[in-house]
Amino acid sequence: MATYLFWCSNLTVDFVMLQGVRFLVFLTLPFTIVVLVSSSALAVWFDRFAYDLLNQYYASVDYRPKDVVLIDIDQESIDRFSGWPLNRGIHAEVIERLSSAEASSITYNVAFIGEDLDNKLGDKRLVDAIKQSGRVILPLIAENGRELKPLNAAELPKAVMGHADLSLDEDEYLRRSYLYAGMGFPRWPSLALASLHVYAPVKADDFSGLRTPYLHVGFSKLWSRDYELLLPFGLASFEQHVLRYPLWALLDGSVPKDKLRNKAIFVGISAPTIENKLKVLPQNSFFSTEIHAFIFSTLNRGYMLSPSLSVWAVILGILATLCWGLFLAKLPVGWRFAGFCMVFLLAGVPVWLLSLGYWLSMMPMLAGLVSVSCIFTVGRLSGLLLTNKKALD
């Protein structure tokens, strides 16, 4: 029928075109709402809410890492030895034992800030252990506008540097990490990525992440970040199932070497009196070393959760709004059915992308669907009121 009317005469063509233009004009307000919502605080709030909800849902996913071993500097280890901070000769011995056990990489999440003036021999032994190992990754942090490198050294032979930045959102929850960061220029890989460079160099160049404006509009003199990733789901399960030993057990020789061979070792503090846990889930908090190790393991198995540019959420929202408008409009049943099916398919796009490791905001699409529904509802109610009024008159 629509095809017949279309070909009937120029008048009908003009009429159809006019109706189409009126329909698009009618959707101008919903389209505008989609664009505005995509860059609003509402979209940020909704994304955090949705992420937290999914993170809780997948918290119990059975994730048993086979590539990572944690060595915990727990309270018992601190009490058994020299107290905190530990003598750097002890750290050197840890690296020596892990190297002799043929660990593939040793990520030492302890910031050796400055020199130990009371025990320069401990510093020397630590530097020698790092150099002889050739597979040690050390954290780089920033403070008071400058980068602080381990042992106050401009360069440590054979050591690999990685930034230890774990950025919290405004509500004090950790949801994201950055593969690169640095003062003025994001040139340092994260501890997880630097560990992957040592553990599996081929995989280390195969990463994604949302680019930041730093590489496009210039650099500030402050700490800058690039290649943003959301923390993948499953951290709680990782923390429960990862193989881990206390540092004192390693130094006592009670940790079998075959448990350490060809593994990525992460050494870090797990004493609440020394380091605060970071909140990731409402009911779960984690030490930074556990988080770095988890990110490494997800990078190693090729699963990352990368945010998408807001423009794609806007495009999805506009298409869904247009299709929902077709469904609500007074059109032939075939057009309405096609519009409904398209909305259903478009709603599944974020879910499909999530399975591929991409996070696409659904808030612009939801805002478009709600706004166009409200507009059609108001329009039809107004039409009914006018009809009733004319009937009464």
Image: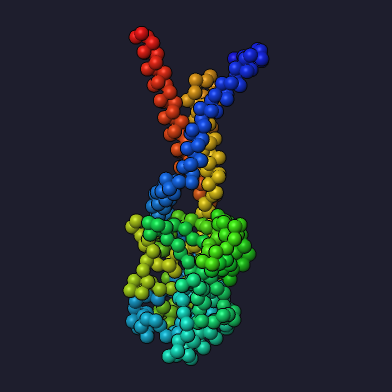
Give the quadrant of residue 6: top right
Residue drawn at (58%, 71%) of the image: 198
Instruction: Out of 347 and 235, give the one closest to the viewer.
Output: 347
Establish if 106 lies above or below 314: below
Pick the quarter of the image with the N terminus: top right
Number of numbered callouts drawn? 0
Residue 68 visible here: no
Establish if 224 lies above or below 125: above
| Image spot of residue 79 (x, y percent) | 33, 81
The answer to whether 214 appears left or right of 175 in the picture is right
Instruction: Out of 70 and 8, give the one closest to the viewer.
Output: 8
Residue drawn at (49%, 23%) of the image: 329
Colour mode? rainbow
| Image spot of residue 34 (x, y percent) | 49, 39
Residue drawn at (44%, 77%) of the image: 255
Residue 313 visible here: yes
Establish if 90 lies above or below 338: below
Establish if 110 lies above or below 348: below
Give the quadrant of residue 389: top left
| Image spot of residue 118 (x, y percent) | 43, 90
Residue drawn at (62%, 67%) of the image: 201
| Image spot of residue 56 (x, y percent) | 38, 52
Give the quadrant of residue 78: bottom left
Pick the quarter of the image with the C terminus: top left
